[in-house]
Image (cartoon, rainbow, N blue to C red):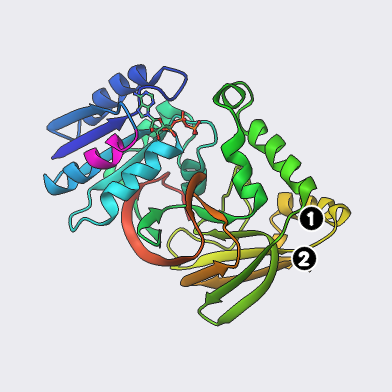
Amino acid sequence: MKAMIILNPSSGKEKANDYAEKIDETLREQYDDIDIRKTEKEGDAAAFATEACVALYDAVIAMGGDGTINEVINGLAEQAHRPALGIIPLGTINDFARALNIPLEPYEAISILDEQNLRSVDIGKINENYFANVIAVGAIAEASYSVSPELKTRLGSLAYFMEGAKSFLSAETIDVSAEHESGTWEGQTFLLLAALTNSVGGFEDLAPEANVNDGKLHVFMIKKMSVPKIATLIPSLLKGELEESEEVEYFCTSFLNVSSDKRHVVNIDGEEGEPLPFNAKVLPSHLEIFVQGNNK
Ligand SMILES: Nc1ncnc2c1ncn2[C@@H]1O[C@H](COP(=O)(O)OP(=O)(O)OP(=O)(O)O)[C@@H](O)[C@H]1O
């Protein structure tokens, strides 16, 4: 049995190397060969993951922030042989870990890397890229790019929240046409979210019905509304009742094709992606991921 650890040494408040030692020790019990690959720049994590597929590794363990994990998923997704995926969250928000019920504490996440904790998980494809959590379009989705690394390190998710709040106040809407499995939605939206799982941007109950392998995207269109109305949405957002709000159009679909007359960049798993239009679809149960035993 062979495992590859893909590690971003710059994430996890520079403690990544200590975690790597611990993981090596844990995996020795199950795997004969363990390879540790350290990333140096963008693209390395995806290339290592593809190499692990081609060389028929049994497991790939991604250690880093959401950016690293997203790259690893992209590196695995196209390959015929896809090793089991372990995620050790070392970033600021760690959406993937939250969404999949993987412990946020790195040593605990290491402790669940056991074959009996493997679970099939859907992933999404948007144009030629893959995502595991959420795609978003709208001013608030673009806000995260303007958060400086210093502020992010100091304040964590609060930094995103502050930028998000600023963009909420500007309340700019987008004209979209969204084709889905039961029709086409056309209108003005303040924010479009299409989630594979129930956790988006640190809100763990955004789409309570979403299950990691239900084969569906859970789509929320937040309609054009006044600034005071926006404030009334916040309690529903926190309670996981967003889909019941009048100001929100909610539907489930296995695919989603979105276009707009203006240039808007799509946020893919928290990272800046390509501009609209996009064609997105779910690849059901495409990856086997180590998750906590009691995950639903
Ligand atoms: N050795 C390295 N030193 C600096 N940057 C690196 C290194 N290896 C990879 N990177 C870059 O760091 C980017 C961000 O990494 P990642 O998302 O894993 O961590 P993070 O920024 O700590 O997480 P978060 O965004 O949640 O705060 C990667 O997309 C990659 O381009």
Nearer to the camera, 60 or 267? 267
Name the residue carrying label 1: 233
Q: Residue drawn at (54%, 68%), measured in percent from left and top?
A: 259
Q: Quadrant of residue 93?
A: top right
Residue 74's place in the image compared with 12, above or below, is below
Residue type marked 1:
Leu
Q: Mark 1: few, some, or many residues within 10 Å (few <14, many ≥20)?
A: some
Nearer to the camera, 168 or 33? 168
Residue type marked 2:
Glu
Q: Farthest residue in the bottom direction?
A: 183
Say whether residue 50 is magenta.
no
Say whether residue 45 is magenta.
yes
Marked residue nearer the N-terminal end (2 or 1): 1
Where does the image place residue 280, in percent across and percent down from the top left? 44, 66
Q: Quadrant of residue 156?
A: top right
Where does the image place residue 187, in percent across and percent down from the top left? 69, 72
Name the residue carrying label 2: 247
Magenta residues, as a range?
42-48
Circles 2 and 1, Cβ within 8 Å, touching? The answer is yes
From the viewer's perspective, is 2 left or right of 212?
Answer: left
Describe the element under mark 1 as helix, strand or loop. Answer: helix
Q: Quadrant of residue 111?
A: top left
